[in-house]
Amino acid sequence: MENQTYGEGSIKSFTSLRTWQKAKTFVVRIYKITKHFPEDEKFGLVSQIRRSSVSVTANIAEGFSRNSANDKKHFYSMSKGSLTETLSHLHIAKDLGFIDLKNFKILENECTDINKMLNGMIKSAKGKDAYT
């Protein structure tokens, strides 16, 4: 059922959205990996990558709570922007040797999957209002 995969359908909480669940797992992985970054990156790259990854889940949750299709699309699009920002940070971390290639590829694949799911949510929100 498409609504259960990307949209909201009869889902009552953002925590039931598969996209949010996958993004949350991604955030937890980011936190675990960045825990091993150099201490002098604590207020630099670690902070940036954590904040941008958390923003992915936060924008999905906020979009879920909005009533208009345009608001939903806006926040789901913001989530995609934060996801892309996180991927950019991951590339830098890999190039600096803070993340090995294996973990980078895992995270990169998760980004790709989440991005596809967000595209589905945006498409599902088009032309729909929570009031109808």
Image: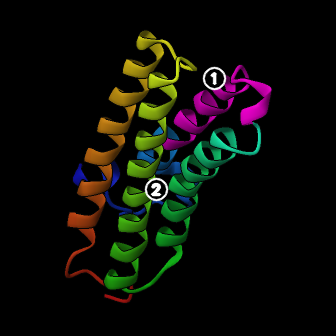
**Residue 5 is covered by the magenta coloring:** no
- Residue 17, image x, y percentages: 46, 51
Give the amino acid at mark 1. Ile
Residue designated by label 1:
33
Crowding near the residue tagged with mark 2, few <14, some 14–19, many ≥20 C-alpha atoms within 10 Å: many
Query: Which residue corresponds to the image point at 67% horizontal and 32% vertical from the top-left?
Result: 31
Give the amino acid at mark 2. Ser
Q: What element carries label 1?
A: helix
- Residue 58, image x, y percentages: 58, 60
Crowding near the residue tagged with mark 1, few <14, some 14–19, many ≥20 C-alpha atoms within 10 Å: some
Query: In which image quadrant can residue 116 be found?
Result: top left
Of helix, strand and loop, which mostly describes the magenta segment?
A: helix
Q: Is residue 48 above or below residue 11?
A: above
Q: What element carries label 2?
A: helix
Of the residues under marks 1 and 2, which one precedes in the sequence? Answer: 1
Magenta residue span? 23-41
Q: In this view, does 127 lie above or below 117?
A: below
Residue designated by label 2:
82
